């Protein structure tokens, strides 16, 4: 960063401002109030075919308030921090809270529930901005160059990129809670395009992301992996419609794991909008499936000292040996279900808090992904999903996919323009193997997994 | 809506300020610079369990500054519209260029304003009770439809976006863009089954649209009808088969199969499966596809794009032949083609790029009933959730949320949701019949590209594709579909 763009208000000023807004809301007639402030800086660059294509650098700041008028709630937000802007935000919130309905379950947490994890969670490293401008561009350039040079069939590129960002979040409420934390991240990525002798093109990508620059994988490594992932797709074909065992690579397995989270999200559970609603204590997955959500892991991508309502984050066993042990909840959904919050409140600046994961993962098994593939006589190694054909109410699952055909325990030719379909209820029960390759590339992580009984739709 | 120099009035901007900022943006050279001022006010309301549980309003304002030098783009933005912050952002964006300063053209040319959505908007607060009425009426109507409807959520959201775009070539454009929508979703339950249904609509319309043309009851009944229907849906078939798409929403096929692949940036970079195919046959001669940004009141319409260029109707495919791409300023200049007014962005925090507006397949001559009758065994899909495309290999998907089997020329049982997958450059070559019943979607579509969301429209008449892969689960021996 040249100079920080937003140094008009210091940290303490923003904490103070959040508390002031809460107090002003209370003086204005609110029975409870909550104020959230977010500020952040971002840098991104994209280098394409060796030339800088975009350079973006900026900072922003915004504020939101949620007020309660008894059991009625409303919220407003603004990017205008002028006195007039803040006045308007507050008065609109107080006005809006007159027209919403009384909801017996509305409210902020009890004072005894509030708190923040202590100690250094290692979420922020200023080194994400430590590189001079030219060096950052060079990260992007090096990633792309490594991809372009890795294989003669890599003929084009959507570029190499380097991104860095820092964020600062403040939350205060009328029970006297005030907390803040900072997080940083940086990433390097490459998106090469390969072309075969018939002119057919394929694109894929690879990336590394970290909270500090010194933990980022080398741009050369990222570029090389991106090239491998792209080239292996060349010459992809359709296959016949059939049922075969499927091996899901970690990036696609992630999304399947994510459906368990969505299915046990208190919001879907209390309204019966999930096929997992009411299944607490029941077997919902194969016996080797243990799923954890842990917002407290030092340095984790999903770590924070408190959730979107000021509840300290925690470790929750969601599924243990195939049995559903816990829903994931915020204050509202916990009250609706007569349970305790799991500290999973997520929030934007406005609106009711939602529910989001901390570090959410599937416990790894003992065998390697290669061993899982080696067991399959005829099957498909799925490396990409396309589209979102998932219905959580029924569990119906149907998505576009591409991957590599497995024959005799070996990866053979690439496959595309197929669908993978089944029902999530059966899919979780049919997770027959979980590999040992758990790695966090974001807040949700799954090892490679095998699921039997799905339909591959093709010719 | 008449443009009343919003930013001049509210932020004390003057032509002189704008020239000053543009000069700062070009202080290190560059071919072009522009400023995008945006002021967005939004309201949303949600009813859930028959209670208005949420009400929210927000204000977001800022300025994005772009400097283009050759193929390079520098970008910076600020949410503080003070002169010092804008100048700082302009100088940051200027870092992309390395050369002697350039001078922006003196003076601005304001183009004659079009008026596709002349909405007069009274103050937000005055209408809030009417908005509450809308969501409550939707809730009541959905529940009244059938006792098996157990969960209803309805939401109303509107916004008014005021923009000002000025460019170093003298571009000066203002617009006030209203956008409103009403959504209803339901869950129907029996002892054995649960099913969901959803519906919604809107556009660049005023509140009275929902009290006259498209009422909460209209959307509520539709959402309820879909969820009841799905209670009895059977497994969808799997594999390649004849597919008939109903009019309206299924136009998401056009958006995914060809729309994205024809955005100029992908073709300039030769990363699209459609690159180099201008003048070539990419669809059956029954297919003419347009992108039309100038349809009054439509969700995808805009008077000017986010680079200040007037929108237009652009023919993409004419009788099966690929005719053109959708371009923004940068691609138009680099490719030596006309700017089609498709440079759009999500907000002042984003760099504009070529995006669709309202994209649809024109009506043909076939009667919809004849199209259904012509199918021996296949599916008839009338509502879709969404879709996605890989523009490089051309593979696209779109997910049906309401579909039926067609057996011996008759629409029969409803089937469960299924994803359809195809290949963009040849999917439309398999179009064998095009109906005379062109319809656009109800106005809830949002398109995502490179992390930027913009409102769009899609549409098509009843259309038959001779072959498309349907991603169901039904086994061939038991599932009612045998090839």
Image: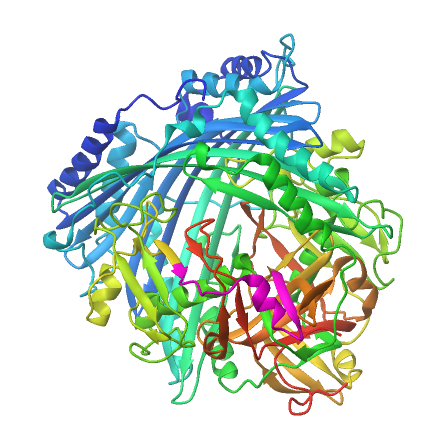
Question: Considering only vertical position in the picture, is B447 above or below A424?
Answer: above
Position of the C terminus of chain B by quadrant: bottom right
Write down the quadrant of residue A45 in the picture.
Answer: top right
Is residue A375 shown in magenta? yes
Residues A273 and B224: in front is: A273
The location of residue B241, given as percent across then percent down, is 75, 78
Q: Which residues are magenta?
A: A361-383
A146 sits to left or right of B212: right
The location of residue A127, given as percent across then percent down, is 41, 28
A264 sits to left or right of A13: right
Residues A160 and B270: in front is: A160
As drawn, which residue projects farthest toward the top? B100
Question: Considering only vertical position in the picture, is B365 above or below A345?
Answer: below
Residues A89 and B193: in front is: B193
**Display colour scheme:** rainbow
Q: Is residue B66 visible?
A: yes
């Amino acid at each position: 960063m040249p100079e920080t763009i937003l140094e008009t208000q210091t940290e303490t000023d923003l904490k103070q401002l959040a508390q002031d807004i809460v107090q002003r809301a209370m003086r204005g007639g609110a029975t409870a109030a909550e104020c959230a402030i977010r500020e952040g800086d971002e840098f991104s660059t994209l280098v394409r075919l060796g030339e800088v294509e975009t350079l973006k650098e900026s900072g922003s700041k915004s504020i939101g308030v949620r007020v309660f008028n008894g059991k009625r709630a409303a919220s407003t937000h603004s990017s205008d921090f002028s006195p007039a802007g803040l006045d308007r935000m507050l008065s609109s919130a107080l006005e809006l809270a007159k027209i919403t309905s009384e909801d017996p379950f509305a409210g902020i947490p009890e004072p005894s529930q509030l708190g923040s994890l202590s100690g250094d969670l290692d979420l922020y490293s200023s080194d994400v901005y430590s590189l001079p401008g030219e060096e950052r561009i060079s990260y992007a350039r090096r990633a792309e160059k490594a991809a372009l040079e890795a294989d003669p069939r890599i003929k084009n590129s959507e570029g190499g990129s380097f991104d860095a960002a820092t964020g600062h979040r403040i939350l205060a409420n009328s029970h006297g809670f005030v907390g803040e934390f900072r997080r940083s991240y940086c990433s390097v990525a490459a998106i090469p395009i390969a072309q075969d002798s018939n002119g057919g093109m394929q694109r894929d990508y690879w990336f590394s992301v970290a909270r500090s620059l010194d933990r980022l994988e080398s741009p050369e490594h990222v570029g090389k992996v991106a090239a491998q992932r792209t080239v292996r797709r060349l010459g992809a074909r359709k296959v016949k419609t059939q049922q075969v065992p499927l091996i899901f690579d970690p990036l696609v397995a992630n999304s399947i794991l994510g459906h368990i989270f969505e299915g046990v999200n208190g919001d879907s559970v209390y309204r019966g909008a999930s096929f997992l609603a009411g299944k607490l204590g029941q077997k919902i997955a194969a016996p080797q499936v243990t799923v954890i959500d842990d917002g407290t892991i030092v340095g984790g991508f999903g770590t924070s000292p408190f959730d979107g309502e000021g509840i300290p984050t925690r470790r929750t066993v969601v599924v243990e040996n195939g049995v559903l042990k816990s829903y994931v909840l915020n204050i509202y959904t916990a009250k609706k279900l007569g349970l305790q919050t799991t500290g999973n409140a997520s929030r934007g600046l406005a609106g009711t808090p939602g529910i989001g994961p901390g570090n959410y993962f599937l416990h790894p098994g003992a065998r390697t992904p290669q061993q899982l593939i080696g067991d399959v006589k005829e099957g498909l190694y799925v490396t990409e999903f396309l589209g979102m054909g998932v219905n959580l109410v029924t569990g119906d699952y149907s998505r576009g996919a591409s991957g590599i055909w497995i024959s005799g325990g070996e990866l053979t030719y690439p496959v595309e323009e197929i669908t993978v379909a089944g029902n999530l209820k059966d899919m979780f029960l049919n997770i027959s193997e979980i590999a040992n390759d758990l790695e966090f590339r974001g807040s949700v992580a799954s090892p490679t997994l095998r699921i039997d009984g799905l339909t591959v739709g093709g010719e | 809506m008449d443009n009343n120099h919003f930013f001049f009035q509210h932020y004390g901007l003057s032509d002189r300020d704008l020239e000053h900022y543009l000069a700062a943006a070009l202080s290190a050279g560059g071919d072009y610079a522009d400023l995008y001022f945006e002021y967005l006010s939004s309201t949303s309301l949600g009813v859930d369990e028959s209670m208005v549980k949420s009400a929210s309003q927000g204000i977001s304002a800022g300025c994005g500054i772009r400097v283009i030098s050759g193929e390079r783009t520098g970008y910076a933005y600020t949410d503080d519209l003070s002169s010092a912050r804008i100048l700082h952002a302009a100088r940051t964006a200027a870092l992309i260029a390395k050369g002697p300063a350039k001078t922006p053209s003196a003076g601005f040319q304001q183009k004659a304003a079009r008026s596709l959505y002349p909405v007069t908007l009274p103050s937000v607060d005055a209408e809030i009770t009417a908005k509450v009425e809308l969501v409550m009426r939707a809730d009541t109507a959905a529940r009244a439809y059938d006792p098996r409807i157990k969960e209803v959520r309805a939401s109303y959201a509107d916004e008014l976006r005021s923009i000002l775009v000025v460019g170093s070539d003298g571009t000066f454009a203002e617009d006030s863009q209203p956008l409103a929508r009403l959504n209803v979703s339901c869950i129907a339950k029996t002892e054995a089954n649960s099913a969901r249904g959803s519906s919604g609509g809107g556009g660049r319309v005023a509140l009275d649209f929902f009290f006259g043309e498209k009422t909460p009851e209209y959307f509520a009944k539709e959402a309820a009808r879909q969820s009841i229907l799905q209670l009895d849906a059977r497994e969808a078939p799997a594999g390649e088969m004849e597919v008939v798409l109903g009019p309206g929403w299924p136009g998401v096929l056009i958006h995914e199969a060809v729309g994205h692949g024809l955005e100029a940036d992908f073709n300039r970079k030769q990363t699209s499966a459609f690159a180099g195919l201008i003048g070539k046959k990419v669809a059956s001669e029954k297919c003419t596809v347009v992108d039309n940004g100038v349809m009054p009141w439509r969700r995808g319409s805009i008077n000017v794009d986010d680079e200040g260029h007037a929108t237009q109707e652009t023919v993409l495919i004419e009788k099966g032949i690929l005719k053109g791409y959708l371009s923004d300023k940068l691609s138009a200049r680099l490719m030596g083609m006309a700017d089609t007014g498709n440079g759009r962005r999500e907000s002042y925090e984003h760099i504009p790029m070529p995006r669709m507006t309202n994209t649809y397949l024109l009506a043909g001559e076939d009667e919809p009933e004849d199209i259904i009758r012509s199918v021996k065994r296949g599916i008839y899909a009338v509502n879709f959730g969404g879709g996605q495309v890989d523009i490089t290999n051309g593979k696209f998907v779109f997910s049906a949320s309401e579909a039926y089997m067609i057996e011996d020329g008759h629409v029969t049982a409803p089937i469960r949701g299924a994803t359809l997958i195809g290949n963009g450059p040849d999917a439309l070559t398999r179009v064998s019949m095009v109906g005379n019943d062109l319809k656009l979607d109800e106005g809830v579509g949002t398109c995502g590209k490179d992390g930027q969301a913009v409102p769009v429209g899609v549409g098509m008449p009843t259309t038959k594709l001779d072959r498309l892969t349907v991603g169901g689960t039904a086994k061939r021996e038991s599932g009612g579909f045998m090839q």
